[in-house]
Amino acid sequence: MHSQTDVLAAEALYIRGIRANLHQFIQQAIQVFFVGLVIGMERNVLPVLSQDFGVPKGSFLYLTSFVASFGFVKGMLNFYAGRLSERIGRKKVLLLGWLGAVPIPFMILYAPNWGWVVAANIFLGVNQGFAWSMTVTSKVDITKAEQRGFATGVNEFAGYAAVGMGGLATGYLAQLYGPREALFGFTLVVIMLAASIALLFVKETLPWAKAESSQHANGTYSGHQPRFPQGVSAHPGTWEIFTLVSFRHPTFSALCQAGVTNKIADALLWVLFPVFLHDKGLGLVQIGWVTAVYGMVWGASQLATGALSDVIGRKKPIVAGLWLLGMGIASVPLVHGITAWTIVAAVMGIGMALLYPNIIASVADISHPNWRSSALGTYRYWRDTGYAIGAIALGLVAQWSGNIEKAFWFTAIVLGVSGLYLAMQAEETHPKLSR
């Protein structure tokens, strides 16, 4: 048993706040930037050149299979990473994520067919599920509740700006060195650099979460009190947390379904948007610029949209983001020309920025520090399983209709319904505004 003096000493040592933990805050942003570069390398070259890996033209379901494998693995490991990090710590799980990424560049370089790309994306799911999850959790550990929107905004800004940059960079490199060689060299350098920095400079943040839990327990927590769900045990089991966040709590479940639908949209923009643009006559570099604008606007705008939710609450930006994203996607088949598609890509990026960090912040708002990582892992399980659901659903829609544009209409409708459901079902979660 720890004495009261030991508890107070720990609370004094692990002070929360961005300013107090600025070095580690920056280190976590660097880590998620590298994670974004790894997934970004697939956002341009692979979908467009899929026929070089043996995917027949028009085989949309086969094409989307590499996103399905990624989504299933990442979704499952998001949840497992959350639970595991509450036992062994955040840093070890982060390093496991980088270890899991090592086979990716080699499998793409030597892939004799598309099946190898699908298998490589299993390892991409490992990297994303472990590494990206821990950057989010660690930032929430070391920041104050009233900074949570900004903190998650910075995290997702760094990650998704890198997604856009990765797609653009590999587009240029593929023209210079060939697609396989470009993806191999780019990805291997990123993985080695990121793992080295994580090992040397990232600190364990689990003690901050434990100190916060002690403050809630002994009544010394300062600031606006969060509204945690009632009837949850102090140290709930895996199934209790999973069912609470997935189904039993109306706000949690509404946030989970919004996560699923936004990843259905991102699956469309990952796989079918580049193919659509290629079919309209755009080259690799032009496609790289359009998709980079989507990723970089999404990333950069989160610096503002995350901070906005700290002022006006989480719910309004999330609903607005779902609807704006849906309108942008519906506009893609209606406009023509690289300028118009670039503008629409920027609109979709703003929509994603409004919803993406604020769903994470909303889940964190009402999750107790004892099980916050597991709650975030459960949400991220559902959200990233949306990649798999979207890949299969969109592949089937495009395959059966023989028209890639139908997939855009389908996704826009799903987003509209999702925003309406969240508006009706979810409560505001910001500790200052949820009373």
Image (cartoon, helix red, strand yellow):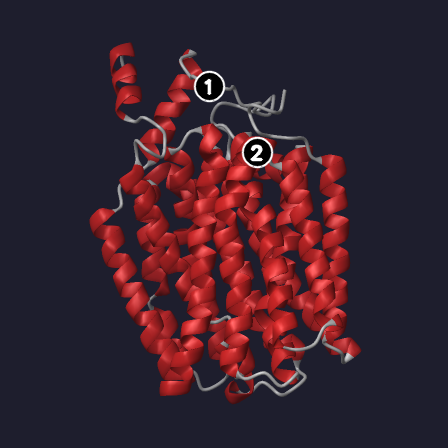
- The spot of residue 201 in percent (x, y) is 22, 47
Label 1 – label 2 distance at C-alpha: 28 Å
Q: Could you tell me which secondary element the residue under label 2 belongs to?
A: helix
Q: Residue at x 57, y 33 (%)?
A: 240
Residue nearest the viewer, comparing 185 with 81 = 185
Give the amino acid at mark 2: Glu
Say if 107 sits above or below 230 in the image: below
Residue farthest to the left, as pictured: 200
Q: Quadrant of the N terminus?
A: top left
- The spot of residue 230 in percent (x, y) is 61, 21
Q: Residue 408 vs residue 239: left or right?
A: right
Locate residue 227: give its quadrant: top right
Q: Residue 148 vs residue 2: left or right?
A: right
- The spot of residue 220 in percent (x, y) is 40, 13
Locate residue 434: give its quadrant: top right
Q: Residue 100 vs residue 322: left or right?
A: left
Residue underneath mark 2? 240
Residue underneath mark 1? 223
Say if 313 sits above or below 257 in the image: above
Q: Quadrant of the C terminus?
A: top right
Q: Residue at x 31, y 21 (%)?
A: 11
Q: Is residue 120 visible?
A: no
